[in-house]
Image (spheres, grey):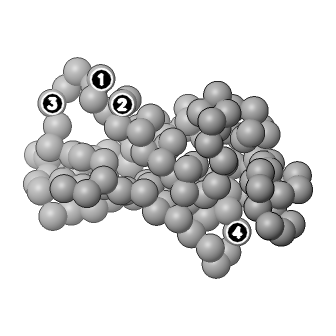
């Protein structure tokens, strides 16, 4: 199996309601997102997936979150904007986008990892 990944960053603030510490106060991060796709094979050019296509899938979601207050985003109105939930949000939106692609592909979304600040990282992936 082949894995390819792209990394992107965005800046956003958030509050974790009910958290028993500083994260219950307004604060921000320069978030890092790593998305991986898996493929059992390669296309005729020897690629699992074109890196530019991978970037293009992720870019609109990064723009949506960049320089925002995550608590104001509709997805986070009913859930806290933790790293785990940000990873879940990005995974689900990427999965939805990929399912609406017209060209069939053996490439599948593998995981989304989110770092709000080193060394802390949360990963979402579906179990098979």
Which residue is disc 3 drawn over? 104
Task: State the mark number for residue 12.
Answer: none
Measure how far apart labels 2 and 1 are at the Cα level: 7 Å
**Residue 112: horizontal and vertical position, in percent?**
44, 55
Q: Which residue is at 62% across, 42% downward?
A: 79
**Residue 7: horizontal and vertical position, in percent?**
52, 57
- The answer to which of marks 3 and 2 sits earlier in the sequence is 2
Measure how far apart labels 3 and 1 are at the Cα level: 10 Å
Measure how far apart labels 2 and 4 are at the Cα level: 27 Å
User: Is any atom of residue 28 visible in this view?
Assistant: no
* 3 or 4: mark nearer the eye: 4
Confirm or deny contact between disc 2 and disc 1 (CB under 8 A): yes
Q: Which residue is at 64% across, 28% downward?
A: 74
- The answer to which of marks 3 and 4 sits earlier in the sequence is 3
Which residue is disc 1 drawn over? 100
Task: State the mark number for residue 96.
Answer: 2
In which quadrant of the rendered view does residue 118 lie? bottom right
Few, some or many C-alpha atoms within 10 Å of disc 1 (few <14, some 14-19, many ≥20)? few
């Amino acid at each position: 199996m082949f894995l390819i990944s792209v990394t992107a960053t965005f800046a956003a603030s958030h509050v974790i309601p009910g958290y028993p510490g500083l994260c219950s106060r307004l604060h921000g991060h320069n978030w890092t997102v790593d998305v991986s796709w898996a493929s059992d094979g390669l296309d005729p050019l020897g690629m699992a997936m074109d890196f530019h296509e991978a970037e293009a899938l992720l870019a609109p979601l990064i723009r949506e979150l960049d320089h925002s207050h995550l608590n104001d985003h509709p997805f986070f109105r009913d859930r806290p904007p933790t790293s785990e939930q940000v990873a879940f949000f990005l995974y689900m939106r990427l999965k939805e986008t990929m399912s609406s692609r017209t060209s069939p592909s053996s490439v599948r979304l593998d995981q989304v990892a989110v770092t709000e600040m080193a060394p802390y990282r949360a990963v979402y992936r579906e179990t098979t």
